[in-house]
Amino acid sequence: MPTHTFSTHLTFINDPGHGWLRVPLTDIAALGIEEQITPYSYIEGNFAYLEEDLDAPRFLEVLTAQGLPQPEITDQYVERFSRHKDPFPHDPAFWDKLRS
């Protein structure tokens, strides 16, 4: 199995009420933390939007625990972040496809 190359640059998107870290789904799959992500995070396309209180910190903590470098994070402010995205999937088959 090839080694996964983690993203070195991520975007933190915030609106007046909350914030989300935009992370490639493949990074989450490579860490194997999908079961630890709450329903307050979303996906759109090939990215997860990890909510700022639990999920984004958890992702960054696991990177550190596994001895991986922290990505550079750029802030992006938006007036309104659309929450009309797909719910975060917990189906093992979804994640297995990303790992193969």
Image (cartoon, helix red, strand yellow):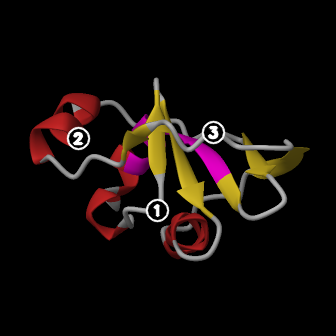
- Residue 79, by quadrant, is top right
Please, what is the three-letter code of the amino acid marked with disc 1?
Tyr
Q: Residue at x 73, y 51 (%)?
A: 71
First-in-chain label (2 vs 3):
3
Question: Which residue is outermost to the left?
Answer: 93
Label 3 sits on residue: 82
Return the mark for residue 95: 2
| Secondary element at tag 2 | helix
Quarter of the picture containing the C terminus is: top left
Above or below, comparing residue 1 to residue 72 in the picture = above
Instruction: Name the residue at the top extreme.
Output: 45
Query: Label 3 crowding class (10 Å Cα cut-off): few <14, some 14-19, many 20+?
Result: few
Q: Is residue 76 left or right of residue 31?
A: right
- Quick check: 60 left or right of 58? right
Name the element at disc 1. Answer: loop
- Residue 63, above or below 80: below
Q: Residue at x 76, y 64 (%)?
A: 17
Describe residue 41's horizontal placement relative to residue 2 as left or right: right
Residue 56 on image: x %, y %: 59, 64
Give the vertical position of 11 relative to 34 (above or below).
above
User: Which is more toward the observer, 66 or 49?
Assistant: 49
> What are the residue bounds of the magenta stretch?
21-28
| Residue ID at (66%, 55%) | 20
Q: Report how many numbered discs are placed on residues in the image.
A: 3
Kind of residue at disc 3 = Ser
Per the image, the residue denoted by label 1 is 40
Mark 1–mark 2 contact, CB under 8 Å? Answer: no
How far apart in space, not on screen, are marks 2 and 3 (Cα)?
Answer: 24 Å
State the image coordinates of residue 8 (x, y, percent, origin top left): 71, 41
